[in-house]
């Protein structure tokens, strides 16, 4: 409580908006075309440039991006796809949507990303692909993953929902050529936040063509192209003809289209893309601010022996999507922060422990099962002020360092081995 009343609540995530997003949305509304159209085209072009990808296909969520990437693999019932257990449920659900089975893999205890050794152990003759997740923006050790995958003819999909602006080695995530697809989320909490939206990037022109069709009902022309837009150079048919009945795709009327596949209504619209373009412009600045705040947290917590700060391996530059500490006092700290008006969260309960995926035949994944109980995500977003962050830091460091018997036991374990 300050002298003037309770301190304002501090959320975990907050999108960074200014006057540019409403202005861009207004321009789209005034254009009277609000579906998928030229603004989506521009967003895709600029996003592909930014991440140095061959192709970028905009969709209406990160989940849709993962779904369509999996759909491109033509998975069959009985096929298996390896998925880290510490992720948002969309990573695994996307596999199930395609009739295949997600097989959960343990994590590296330091980076919280998929453990390449356990990945290798989990391969069976039915394994078709692996989806890796760049947890918190920290890229996975991709060279090891590609080597294992290529040795077993597995397709690699990157779930880059957390990794907008991250790098692996010197290259941006999204433009890594040895992965078939990279899937981004632009959900409300992400570094590039549009409400709901996503993007698939791919180096393959054939995959891009398939994705364009799958995201729009399997139809080969968008409504914009058919109703007046000319994004892909469609011309009017020859006035001299009696009827527009040609099957020749080069000689069709503007209104004509074909349904060539079972697609979904997963396309992005121009309102969303307009926000996306503004967010893309600010992405690097926002990520720089996140990095500065991350370093400030690291310094402030360096001497707090009862908690552990995140690490960054030298093969990645993280976009610092979230700031996840580890402590045996996780739940007590969460409640303590809540009382101080500071939100915190947990990313994630491992998926193999969730009721939908908890089967009798699931093997145990000991690292994830131990580590997740200690994870706590603290507030991190570009507009978090130094003063607000100091409030978070003071609140964390003021947690009385005693606890229940079970917390003391966990803390002792923590000190012994898991540091
Ligand atoms: C790791 C991960 N994968 C996939 C998704 C799904 O993205 P969306 O919420 O945009 O569908 C999310 C988003 O919350 C995520 O965090």
Image (cartoon, rainbow, N blue to C red):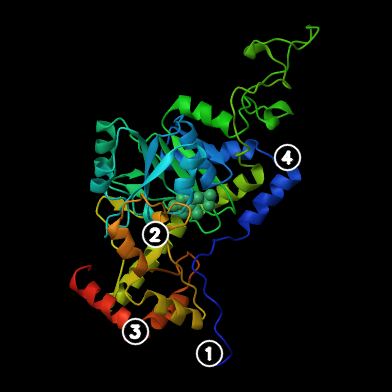
Crowdedness near tag 1: few (<14), some (14–19) or many (≥20) residues, C-alpha within 10 Å: few
Q: Earlier in the sequence, mark 4 or mark 2?
A: 4
Q: Residue 119 placed where, x, y %?
A: 28, 45
Q: Residue 103 placed where, x, y %?
A: 37, 45
The answer to which image quadrant residue 371 occupies is bottom left
Asked if residue 340 shows in the view, the reply is no
Crowdedness near tag 2: few (<14), some (14–19) or many (≥20) residues, C-alpha within 10 Å: many
In the displayed orientation, state which residue is furthest to the bottom.
3
Secondary structure state at the residue bearing disc 2:
loop
Which residue does the numbered mark 3 point to in the structure image? 404
Q: Is mark 1 within 8 Å of ligand 1?
A: no
Secondary structure state at the residue bearing disc 4:
loop
Q: Earlier in the sequence, mark 3 or mark 4?
A: 4
Instruction: State the separation of the CA atoms marked 2 and 1.
Output: 30 Å
Secondary structure state at the residue bearing disc 3:
loop
Q: Residue 148 placed where, x, y %?
A: 25, 37
CB atoms of marks 1 and 3 within 8 Å = no
User: Is 210 located above or below residue 52 in the figure?
Assistant: above
Which residue does the numbered mark 1 point to in the structure image? 2
Q: Earlier in the sequence, mark 4 or mark 1?
A: 1
Crowdedness near tag 4: few (<14), some (14–19) or many (≥20) residues, C-alpha within 10 Å: some
User: Camera-side residue: 100 or 248?
Assistant: 100
Instruction: State the separation of the CA atoms marked 3 and 2.
Output: 33 Å
């Amino acid at each position: 409580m300050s002298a003037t009343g309770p301190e304002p609540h501090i959320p975990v995530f907050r999108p960074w908006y200014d006057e540019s997003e409403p202005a861009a949305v207004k321009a789209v509304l005034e254009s009277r075309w609000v579906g998928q159209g030229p603004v989506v085209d521009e967003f895709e072009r600029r996003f592909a440039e930014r991440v140095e990808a061959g192709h970028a296909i905009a969709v209406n969520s990160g989940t849709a991006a993962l779904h369509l990437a999996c759909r491109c693999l033509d998975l069959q019932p009985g096929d298996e796809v390896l998925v880290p257990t510490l992720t948002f449920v969309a990573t695994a659900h996307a596999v199930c949507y395609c009739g295949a089975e997600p097989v959960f893999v343990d994590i590296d205890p330091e980076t919280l990303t998929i453990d390449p050794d356990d990945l290798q152990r989990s391969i069976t003759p039915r394994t078709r692909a692996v989806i890796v997740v760049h947890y918190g923006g920290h890229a996975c050790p991709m060279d090891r993953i590609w080597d294992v995958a290529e040795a077993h003819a597995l397709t690699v999909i990157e779930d880059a929902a957390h990794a907008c602006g991250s790098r692996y080695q010197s290259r941006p995530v999204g433009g890594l050529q040895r992965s078939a697809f990279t899937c981004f989320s632009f959900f409300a909490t992400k570094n590039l936040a549009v409400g709901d939206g996503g993007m698939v990037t791919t180096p393959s022109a054939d995959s891009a063509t398939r994705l364009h069709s799958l995201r729009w009902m399997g139809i080969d022309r968008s409504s914009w192209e058919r109703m007046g837009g000319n994004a892909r150079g469609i011309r009017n048919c020859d006035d001299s003809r009696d009827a527009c009945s040609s099957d020749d795709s080069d000689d069709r009327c503007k209104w004509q289209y074909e349904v060539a596949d079972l697609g979904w209504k997963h396309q992005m619209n121009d309102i969303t893309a307009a926000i996306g373009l503004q967010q893309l412009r600010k992405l690097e600045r926002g990520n720089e601010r996140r990095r500065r705040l991350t370093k400030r947290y690291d310094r402030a917590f360096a001497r707090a022996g009862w908690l552990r700060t995140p690490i960054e391996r030298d093969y990645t530059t993280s976009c610092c999507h979230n700031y996840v500490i580890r402590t045996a006092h996780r739940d007590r700290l969460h409640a303590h922060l809540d009382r101080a008006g500071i939100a915190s969260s947990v990313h994630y309960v491992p998926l193999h422990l969730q009721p939908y995926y908890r089967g009798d035949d699931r093997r145990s994944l000991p690292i994830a099962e131990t580590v997740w109980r200690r994870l706590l995500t603290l507030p991190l977003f570009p507009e978090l002020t130094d003063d607000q962050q100091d409030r978070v830091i003071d609140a964390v460091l003021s947690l009385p360092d005693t606890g229940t018997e079970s917390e003391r036991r966990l803390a002792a374990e923590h000190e012994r081995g898991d540091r």
